[in-house]
Amino acid sequence: MSKLLSSDKSTVLFLGNEAIARGALEAGIEVATGYPGTPSSEVIESLAGVARERDLYVEWSVNEKVALEVAAAASFAGLRSMAVMKQNGVNVASDFLLHLTASGTRGGIVLVSCEDPGALSSVNEGESRYFASMLEMPLLEPADFQEAKDITKWAFELSEAIGNVVMLRSVTRMSHASGNVICGKLPVKRRKASFQYEGPVMDSQTGPMISTPVVAKHLLRQQKLKEVRRIFDNSPFNRYIGPVKPDLLIITGSACFLYSCEAVEMLALQKRAGILKLATTWPLPPKLLEKYLRKAEKILIVEEVMPFLEENVKVMASGIAGRIGIKTFFGKYDGTLPSAGELNPDIVADALGRILKVKRKSLPANYLKDVQKTAALIPPREQTFCAGCPHRASFWNIHNAVALDGRKGFVCGDIGCYSMAALSPATGYHTMPTLHSMGSGTGLASGFAKLARFGLDQPILTVCGDSTFYHAVIPALINAQHNRADITFIVLDNAGTAMTGFQPHPGLSVSALKEVVPAVDIAEICKAVGAKVAVSDPFDLLATGQILTSFLADKGSLKVLILRQACALSPEKKGKKTFDVLVDETRCLGDACGCNRLCTRIFRCPALTWDRDKKKAVVDEVICAGCGVCASICPQQAIVKTEVSTPG
Amino acid sequence: MRVDLSAAGDCQNGGQHTGMKEKTLTKTKNAILTGVGGQGNVMASRTLAHMLVDAGYVVTIGETFGMSQRGGSVMSHLRVSRDSVKSPQIPRGGADVIVGLEPLEALRVLTVYGNPQVCVLYNSRPVYPIGVITGELSYPSGETIRNAFERLSSRYWEIDATSVGVKLGNPVLSNIVMIGALSKTGLLPFDRRSFEKEIKKTLSAGKYEINLKAFDAGADMIK
């Protein structure tokens, strides 16, 4: 049995995302949707894992906007539902979200945004809390694992109490951290779905679900927010820890609460600093905040990443300044805390130390000096494509074709493991100089291609992964064809949403629920759009190189090359070598070759290393995935591959 | 089973405690597991954490994975407390135990989270960073690394866990070899019985035997 279904009152170690999933189960959720994205993916994954036992409908949607729409349909029909995404996914869903908060909702619906301060697994550290204030919907931020479960459960009740969507925000250090959770009851009753639409237009429980009349519905939404403030003032999830009259009041929430507690402990400031932990961060609970703002003259706001709480607390404090007096605020605006990147206990402790003028106990000076000297000897570990990764071969092909073409062609990048080609330029053989949001590689390429009339004479290429293709690329591809953009578009099809853990996507014939579904074929879509389409195996350097070279020479049309090879970490491939690969020492000429160490210096596979004593290349058998691509690049044919008779 | 935490992990007294003596916990135990993406770091930290939760502790793990899977450094902060949830990030200089699946990563963590009392267990098998493979950077010698641990930790153990994993048929088993070795050091309050109980729940019968073998092989490497 999945630990997600552990019995009432049992203590279980849950990942923050599993705690959110358990909370949804305890709330009696019927429908859960999402698009994979670190650090959010485990919520939907774990719900999909118990969908059969709990009779849920769970889907990986094509993108976040559709995920929210699918979840909203369930809410409109009276069921409880949840849509889960990473921070920038909320941007994708935001157009629908704007209208959803206006039409209102019925069955409890929670939008879960798992965000990534410090961009540990993102190419942005955007945050979605501002959507809550901008779209006037309640925002909840759990501060530990038990709360992640309990607050999720409560979010559904809140959503039903006010007839609007509730946003729950987590961060990497919560979603991808784990801790003890005491489970509650799993409900037995099940709701029946039915969609009523014949009632009056202003009655969101029986009438049509629309955002008009706009002004009237907008006022209704604001009315709901008033009710939320009252509820938040009494929420048990907001609490204060500290002395009656602290020298400093820390206002915080989310993982920053844990950092703050640790910082107070590190500096032994329990008698001087108080912590007001807010779980309800929009709208702010007015009475509660007034009560605690009165307690201290100095206020420190600890949050990630933008000064969202800080701004809203300051606005509230200025409105009641006559009653609470003038306060001194510390936070992001005055530079007490960094305005970008994630926080940690050390950063918060340093801030506390500066405000309250206390020194932190330090390690012995000679130890620190030795540590510093030692740290200088440690080479950084740059991220790179895994051994056996099809992307390395794909970019090798792209680089060589672009170099042969000689017109300084470049690749517009996109989001996936292949983003590494831009993040670490040598890994992508310096071919991919742009990287933005999902689907924007093709949109940018479409734009660059139209600059020929202004003198731009470089060939334009773009890449995207298979999951990204469905998510956001199709409109840009159609745009390219409609506007006759001359681009070479390469789909790096590695048979799954590899970066986030092999979630299925519409190109596969399996769904989140492991049901057989029709596969939507990328090549057929591209052909229907009107592009010239070719398919190749990136490991076949010769064939792929020929197609790319001919595509670059073929001016004036939209060309699509689908490079198909499963990810080296995919369940069907992992640990199974196609080839045994070794370096024949008698053939490797080492430094004398004249290749200038093409294999180790340029190709950059983690499994192909350099033996400093023998001054020759050597394959690390433990790391080698057996793809055999390196055997095709050695000018001396010194890298030898032999097919493994029975892979396994 | 409840094994007391404060009785475990006193490596200055030889690190050979079995951890069975009953005492009151006074301090959170901070351990960091580190390695390179693909070495099974996350699996190892979760296995440890599950055992400790079963033993009655409040455990917090903070993990760095995701993109770091792709050949980058991976780190799990494991915090074991008698009573409360902790920050998923350990403060600088705050580690009691460092378990390195790769020597360079163990050293990297030591230079941020180490202190004169820290105990270190590490796998001697290097995984070379790309910058080293290309020849732009150099990897410190085994001797340099040993010397650094000698100076900067109160006790350290170096074992070749990867070779044991390879001998058992799969190099990724080295993470379990390390857990076995860790049990013998007494740095964290768990033993073979708790490991057996844990993998019985999580692993298929086919994988159970080989994992137990890896655990035992690791334990045998700590004298």
Image (cartoon, coloured by chain):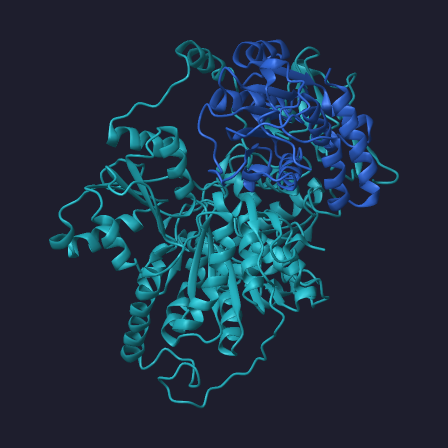
Chain colours: A cyan, B blue
Above/below status of A192 relative to B111: below
Q: Nearer the viewer, residue A282 or A411?
A: A282
Query: Residue B172, located in which quarter of the rendered image?
Result: top right
In the displayed structure image, the side of residue B97 where residue A304 appears, left or right: left
Q: Nearer the viewer, residue B21 or A64?
A: B21
The quarter in which the C terminus of chain A is drawn is top right
Question: Which residue is depicted at the point 46% across and 23% down?
Answer: B93
Q: Position of residue B54 (x, y in %)?
A: 65, 41
In the displayed structure image, the side of residue A357 where residue A146 appears, left or right: right
Q: Position of residue A334 (x, y in %)?
A: 22, 38
Above/below status of A418 relative to A556: above
The quarter in which the N terminus of chain A is drawn is bottom right
Q: Is residue A414 visible?
A: no
Q: Position of residue B47 (x, y in %)?
A: 67, 38
| Number of marks drawn | 0
Query: Residue A636, located in which quarter of the rendered image?
Result: top right
Question: Which residue is depicted at the point 71% across and 16% down?
Answer: A589
Q: Position of residue A296 (x, y in %)?
A: 21, 43
Q: Is residue A59 visible?
A: yes
Residue found farthest to the right = A645
Question: Which residue is depicted at the point 39% across and 42% down?
Answer: A256
Q: Nearer the viewer, residue A82 or B169?
A: A82
